[in-house]
Every structure is written in C-alpha cells, then in structure tokens.
Image: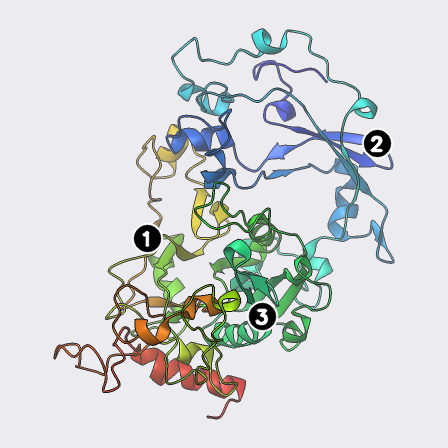
Amino acid sequence: YSLSSHEKADPDGVETRFICRFKPNGEETLSRFNLNYDYVAFRKNHKQLFTKEGRWDIKSLHTSQLLFMCPVPEHLQEQVRDGSSVINDFATLFLDIIPIRTPPRYGPPNVFLPPRYSEFITDNKTEVFNAEDEWGENHILPIIENSGRWENIPICKPSWMTYVEQEPTRPETKEEVSHRLISCVWASAGYATRGERFGIYDGHRRLREWLHHAFLTGFDHVYVYDNSGANSNETSLQMVTDDFPGKVTRIVWPSRVCNNNKNFADSPGERSSQYAAESSCRLRFGPHTEWIGQFDIDEYFVPMDNYNTVPQLLDTLEKEGKKIISFGSWRAWPRKNLITEPVPINDYSICDSREPCFHLTIPENQTILQTYNCDRQKGQQKEKKMPAEKQFYRPDYVKLHFVHYSTVTALTLMNKQETIDFGQQWRRNVHADPLSRFGNEVTEGTMLHTKAIATQDTSGWQRACKGDNRMMCRIGNPFKEGEDDLGETSDEEGWIYNCYVNRKIEDFYVPSLEKSMKISN
C-alpha cells in the first residue's frame, strides 16, 4: 500500500485508517468509517478537529468514539452471516487490525475532505492539505509483519444468533424488525460517585424496579450492558436480568472508564465504557428495532396527559415525521416521610464535613419511583433544565449518539445537494436537527431523575432543611396542594417545602408499579 491523494486512491481507500486482515487465509480489506469526522467538525463550525495541546479535544462529543468497520471478504460473508464459522463456541476466523500510521493533521477540518464534500474545501491555499507535498508520491507503507497491530481478534456469531432466545430471526427489512421500542442500559451492581467520593451499591434493586416500569410504559426489550465486572468479580446483575426471560438481554461488559474524576477537574471524568456500550448497542441491536429510548436506571420516563405508554407518543412523532425527541433532566429529591428515619453520623471521615450526615435508605416495601416523586419545579414543564437531556431516537437516522445527545444524524452527513434532495433547507452550520424536538412535559411526558443521594451530600441536613440558605436541602418535603399559592414555605416542624408531587405518577404509575412488583405497603 502507498499513501495518496483522494483523487488517486482506490475506491475503497478514499476514507480509511486501518488494514483489516482476515485469518487464516490472510485476505485483506480496508476499513470504512461510519462517519466522516472532519466533515462533522466542519458542519459543527469547529475551528480544528484536533489540537496540539489536546486539552479541548475531549470536549467534542462527536469524537468521543472512533467508529469504523472492516468489510468482510465476499467469499467469507455467508459464513460470518450465518455463524457457521463458530464451531462448538470456538471461532475459526480471526481478524488483525493494522493502523495506517501518518502524522496527525491539525488545523481546520475542511483542508482534506473527500470528493463527496470537495465543494467545502477551504479556499485558503496555504491551509489546504496536499497529500503529495506531505507524503511524497511514493510513500510505501511497511509490510504488515513489520507493523504494530491488534492480532487474532475472534470473529464471533452475529448478535441475532448470540442472543437467539431474544432475537430468533435476522431482520431483512424495516417491516421485519423485531421490536418497536428498546432501551440500551449501561449499569452496574455498584459504582463510585465522581471523584471516588462515595460507593453506591443499590444496582440490583434499582435495575429490577426500573425494568418493571419500562415494560409497564411500553418498552419491548431492554439490553443491559452489565458493567459490574469493572468494579468486582464477585457480583453481577444476572440475578435481576434472569427474572425477565425473553424481555431482557444481559451483555457482560467489564470495560472500565478512563477516569472517574470530578467534572471540573483538570482532566474531567471520561465514561469511555458507557460511550462504547451505547454505540455497541445501537450498532448491534439498532437494526432490530424502530426506536431506542436512551435512559439510565435512575431515570424514569413518565407519559403524561392522554398518553399512558411510550408507543402512543411514538405514533405522534411518526405522524410529524420526527426522528428524535428530547426530555430535560432535573434531579428530584427523596421525600422525608418515605425514607427510613435518619440516624445521625458524627464522623468527618464519613460525612466529609463537621456537620452530621446519615445513610439514606428506602424501605423495601417502598418504590424508588414514589419516594423520589418530588420534582423541584412546580408543574411538570421544566422552566430550567440541567445541561443534560435524554432521548428517544430512530437508530436508522442517528449515526452517533452520546449519552444525552444525537450528535451525528443522517442529515449531518449530507452535502448540500443531498440535503436539498432530502427535502430540507441547506445550512452549513448544524445546530438543532430539524427532525428533532423537545417533548412537552405537561401533555406528552416527563422524566423523573431519581439520582441516589450520597451520604456526604446529606451533611448538615438538619439545618439545611429547616431554612439555612447557605446549604442545600436534598431531602424532599412536598408542598401540599395550594400551600405554595398561600405563601406557606414550611411545615409545622419547620421543614421547608422544596418540591412538588406529580399526581399522575402518584395516582397511576405507582399503583401499577407496586402491582407489577407485588409490593404491598
């Protein structure tokens, strides 16, 4: 192989980065990117895709994962497709991935675009990347034996066969997809909060309740990427997922995060394991479904008004021609009358404070959903939104999803003429996708974020919850209906009112959830 310009490259070598060698016969193909990262950065008006300093590169959500595929040689495709290359659970085909090494390109992202996007190459001739000037006309790559590489990656059965009990047939067309709505969940039996401040070990309970709620609201199937093995080999979520045969698929996912630093550290937390799990689920199981709902197990989506299930809302979106809908996230507080009576702890090593704290627990006969049904904003329509949201989206339209956002869509990747042919107005800079919108939290649905309260975060609750404005009270004391209109700010014990009960959750979803889980108060 030799490096060349786009114009002189072979068709399969115009956009590639890796040589894919299939073994044992040694046949080679060239990798293909799932999306053109340079063009996406250009559409998002980024001045550079990567910088020499590197500090701000990790803030670009669309570069959070390097996605590419290795085309299977034609004569091997049927073996890979039907799983016959795996015999008695042992792979007989393997893959080597050899990076094509070149110096990194800094500068504007539109200096070396392929022919599909050639109209957008910069007019600044001093910035244009000239392959022959940079690499010469005869830059031959080292032979594979002399190249660094990942070797002997086993080629397993396709996902629709690996999880045959849940996915009995391989979808060929949209009409044949197995599901209307699935969810991809990255979860663990236990985890540490950012900065390794506190351990949370309620994963089993939370997942079980969340799954019951998900199926009550219309999800067909949930894929649980079990990250427990990243923290311990002694536990997993299997005891929960096994309780939902045919409805839940567990994928063992022990990959660790790059780091768990606090958000505002010099090197902020990077949940690489979560990002990769999400892309894995979308790429492996997205072809089996029409919609994906992207939530964590502490986030309960609640259909509102005349909607009682999510598919009813999806019907509305499909009539509108929308591909993505977002809902804002705002942490709710656990209600003081539904949690276990606090036992004060006076230990700085535990509380991280001179103030007393307590271990917040929820009685086993009480649902997490009801306990946290205490929204901090009046009415379901959130006037303020945390810098996070969650979405339902079409996996055939979204090409890269990052936890909260559809960062790259089919429309993002279109050039000007393709956009016009698609029926959309061309705009060079991509902002909100025209086929997406925010949901109406009063008439369509709202999200209740039941994030666990770490022990350290209860420090000083006795003063904070009785009006000390220098501290935040994270224990919910809901306004009684009409009391906020009368100017009442606290109850007879002096506890400040700080949240509101969602009546549909309380009167409709909580009883349904208790019945499903066979909970009796």
Dot 2 corresponds to which residue?
26
In the picture, the disc for residue 437 is: 1
Q: Earlier in the sequence, mark 3 or mark 1?
A: 3
Among all residues in the image, which is located at the extreme left?
A: 486
> In front here: 340 or 163?
340
Q: Quadrant of residue 344?
A: bottom left
Query: Is 281 left or right of 378, judged from the image as shown?
Result: right
Q: Nearer the viewer, mark 3 or mark 2?
A: 3
Q: Amino acid at mark 2?
A: Gly
Badge 1 element: strand
Q: Residue at x 16, y 79 (%)?
A: 488
> In front here: 421 or 53?
53
Give the percent coordinates (x, y) of residue 411.
41, 39
Vertical position of residue 317 compared to residue 55: above or below: below
Q: Amino acid at mark 1?
A: Arg
In the picture, the disc for residue 201 is: 3
Q: Earlier in the sequence, mark 2 or mark 1?
A: 2
Badge 2 element: loop
Query: Decide: marks 3, 1 in contact (CB < 8 A)?
Result: no
Q: Residues within 10 Å of mark 2 (few under 14, many from 20)?
A: few
Q: Residue at x 38, y 13 (%)?
A: 123
Mark pair 3, 1: CA separation:
35 Å
Give the percent coordinates (x, y) of residue 301.
41, 68
